[in-house]
Structures are given as structure tokens and as C-alpha cells.
Amino acid sequence: MKTSNENIVLTGDRPTGKLHLGHFVGSIQNRIALQNQYDQCFYMVADIQALTDNADNPEKVRNNAFEVVLDNLAVGLDPEKTTCFIQSQISEIAELTVLFLNLVTLARLRRNPTVKDEMKQKGFGENVPAGFLVYPVSQAADILFCNSNIIPVGEDQLPVIEQANEIVVKFNSIYGETFRKIQPMISATPRLIGIDGNAKMGKSLGNAIYLDDPKEDVEKKVMMMYTDPKHIHKSDPGNVKGNVVFTYLDIFDPNKDEVKTLKKQYEAGGLGDVEIKKRLVGVLEEVISPIRDRRRELAKKPKLIEEILFEGTKKTRQVAKETMGKVRRQIKIDYFG
Ligand code: ATP
Ligand code: MG
């Protein structure tokens, strides 16, 4: 049932690699639920944002643009319900970014916790590309050019949404009421840890299980997972807290009661790491195998993917034109009508 004509949903991925289980639980599942609740949903391939830290690798961004769409379609994104478009093909987003840049300070951007974390991760230091530092501004433009107000994201993106809302407030206070406040939507698992126990599974971090990983790779990755270093012999009592395998079982295993029993057994001693890892492989296979199969079928139809993006981008351009017309009037740069 459609519940509202007013709310507009926007989501997206950076085409920097194939999507993984973190995306699945952190954002894609939410996207798919929302497309059945709201009349207007947009999905964006954030290629311009991907270039902010991959300017020297355009092939990577280009190749992954189709991959991320494939991943989303394989999980269940429906192009009839969600308009799919490519960020770089909507020049109004760039125009809006330039205008928004005047409404933020460099100091505020440097304080953004997401930007700070990612800069550290990427080892940028003082040599951060200016485009990367200001990506939250460009993300505000992504959201506002199509008047979207509901944004399903992982936890790592919350400070970016907060900054976008500051831009909304500032814009409206200077130029008059134009944009509405944005609401981030967090999933039940807003941040999936990496297979290495790192705080976040990330496609640029080399610690991910991908949605199209063959079963052998899933097996290999699960076997590499960190459990409890003190749990050496099967009979040793083990720790389930901070144990990556149990963290994943909590999220993905549909049989919560059995997981509870296994945890007790593990804590008491007598349950081996290999046993719980084998269970996890089975559980993850249940999630991944239908996605992998659908993805393989869709990958045979590159023309279809191109058409979805072409049509979606065409439709999105209309919306962008309307918003920019209004913005130009508000800022009084509508010289020729
Ligand atoms: P990159 O390392 O290139 O930034 P990424 O893995 O962070 O890639 P993005 O394309 O930046 O992926 O993020 C797409 C969406 O998926 C965002 O809403 C983000 O919050 C969410 N997301 C990414 N990783 C996770 C994760 N491990 N757990 C939950 N949500 C995640
Ligand atoms: Mg990211």
C-alpha cells in the first residue's frame, strides 16, 4: 500500500566496488521495503562522489557503476518503483553543490566525524582532495535536488545527513523557505562489522563478503573470521562477545533459539570454532545464493541495465530542472526568466 504522495526517498551507492553483506543489512533491505511504501523513490549511482577519492582511477568507477545496479536489482530493487539514475548525468547536482558550498565553512567540514574517519582511513592528512573534503555538500545537493526527505543509510552516514540539514536551515533562512528537513532512516543493523572484526565492513577495506561471492569464497572468509583467541581447544570456555562469528549469527541466523543454545554451549566449553563457522557458512549461503543466481541472470542482460539507467536518468533530469529553476529564483540569479 502506498501511504504518502509527499515523502520522497533517495538512496545510493558509490560505484567503488561490488556490494556486500553490510550494504544488504544496512541499506538495500530498507530500500526495498520503502519502494513498496512510497510513491517516489530514487536510486543514485554516486559516480561523482566515487571520483572524489578515485580521480586517478576512472575505469574502476565506470566499471562498478553497472555492478552496483546489478547488486541492487538482484536483491529486489524494482526499476518500476524506484527511479535509477547516474549522478554525473544530472548537471544540476553540480550546480547546486557550488551554491551550497557558500553555506558551509571549511572548519565545519573538517569536524564532520564521517569525513574525519574516512580521511584517516585513506591516509589523506593535509593532502586531502578538496572534492573529497566537501563531499557532504555534494551529498546535500544529491538529496535536495529531487526534494527527497527520507534517506535510508548506514550509521556511518548520519553525520553527513546532519550536515545536509544544516545546509537546509541556512539556505531557507537566507533565501526563503525552499527545502524541507531530511530524515535519515537507519536499519536494524546500521553497521555490520568486517570479517576482520573491523568496526565496518567496507568495500574499500578488503574485509567484506560480497553478494556474489561463490560458496568457496564465503567458506574461506568465514574460516578466517576472528572468534575468541583464548578458545584454543574445543573444551575451553569461549567468549561470544566480540566474537565475529556469533555477531553474524545474531544478525543472519533465522533460528534465534538455536543460536541462544549454541552461545551457552560455547561459553561453557565443548563447542568448536569449526562447528559454528560451518553453521554460519550455511546461514550465509541461504542469504547469498538466491541473490547470486539472480545476479548471474541479470548480468547476461547489460542492455537492460543500460536502459533502466537511461530511462531513469531522463526522468530524473525533469525533476532537477524544476528544482534548479526554483533555486535560481530564490537566489535571484534567474536573469533571463
Ligand atoms: P566505500 O568504502 O567506497 O565508501 P562503502 O562500503 O562504505 O564503500 P558506500 O557506497 O559508501 O559503501 O555506502 C552505501 C550505503 O551502504 C550507505 O548508506 C552506507 O551507510 C551503507 N553501508 C556501507 N557499509 C555498511 C556496513 N558495513 N554496515 C551497514 N551499512 C553500510
Ligand atoms: Mg562509504
Image: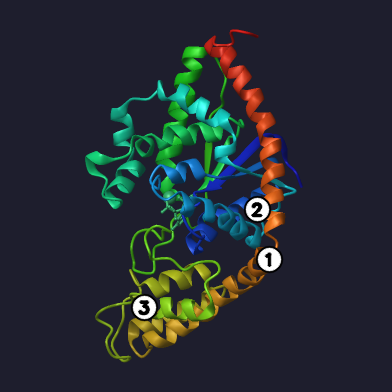
Task: From the top left corner, tell me how far across and down residue 265 is, in percent.
Answer: 39, 85
Q: CA distance from mark 1 to mark 2?
A: 26 Å
Residue type (three-letter) at the residue carrying disc 2: Ala
Q: Indicate which label's residue lies in the foreground, 3 or 2.
A: 3
Residue for badge 2: 33
First-in-chain label (1 vs 2): 2
SS for callout 1: loop
Residue at image location 59% in from the left, 53% down from the top:
30
Q: Mark 3 Cα within 10 Å, few/some/many (few <14, many 20+)?
A: few
Q: Residue at x 24, y 81 (%)?
A: 230
Looking at marks 3 and 2 on the same chain, the residue that comes earlier in the sequence is marked by 2
Task: Answer whether labels 3 and 2 touch (C-beta < 8 Å).
Answer: no
Q: Secondary structure beneath disc 3?
A: helix
Which image quarter is the C terminus in? top right
Which residue, given by chain and number where applicable, does mark 1 sit on? Answer: 300
Amino acid identity at mark 1: Lys
Depth check: 245 or 46 in front? 46
Quarter of the image where one finds residue 283: bottom right
| Residue 98 visible | yes
What residue is pinned by disc 3? Answer: 224
The answer to whether residue 187 shows anywhere in this view is: no
